[in-house]
Amino acid sequence: MCTYETQTVDIEGAGKGAAGWFDLTQASVYVDHPHRAPFGHTVNIDFANPGQGPTARVAVELTEEAALALVAAIQQAIAAAPAGLASANTPV
């Protein structure tokens, strides 16, 4: 069942869309019917930069299991890295 509840968070990063790389400023997460994935409902994540218009968006549609596995993988990757390595304050 669709919840129609969207969780939005401000982010810093970069994404690659059809027109190339762009800065990411926002991520939205919600459970709804997918547009492309062959499932009844998916966890949908939109990575976007609303200030650059609708083409500055990367969307993913994941099963619940895949979304939870992704969360765990992100936590494990960050935990395995030296403290502060993934911080925005780390020089390039």
Image: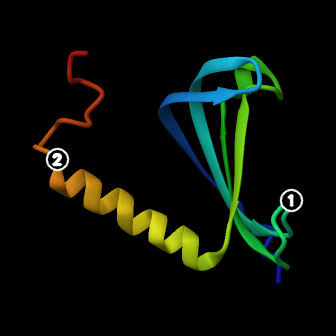
Locate residue 71, reporting x and y percent.
43, 64
Amino acid type of the residue tagged 2 in the rendering: Ala
Local secondary structure at mark 1: loop
Q: How is colour applied across the structure in the image?
A: rainbow
Locate residue 54, reporting x and y percent.
83, 29
Is residue 26 shown above or below 72? Answer: above
In which quadrant of the rendered image does the C terminus lie?
top left
Locate residue 2, reporting x and y percent.
82, 76
User: Which residue bears the numbered disc 2?
Assistant: 81
Local secondary structure at mark 2: loop
Locate residue 66, reporting x and y percent.
56, 71
User: Which residue bears the numbered disc 1?
Assistant: 36
> Which residue is most to the bottom?
1
Left or right of 30 in this view: 26 = left
Amino acid type of the residue tagged 1 in the rendering: Arg
Q: Label 1 vs label 2: CA separation?
A: 34 Å
Is residue 88 shown above or below 4? Answer: above
Which mark is drawn over residue 84?
A: none
Q: Residues within 10 Å of mark 2 (few under 14, many from 20)?
A: few
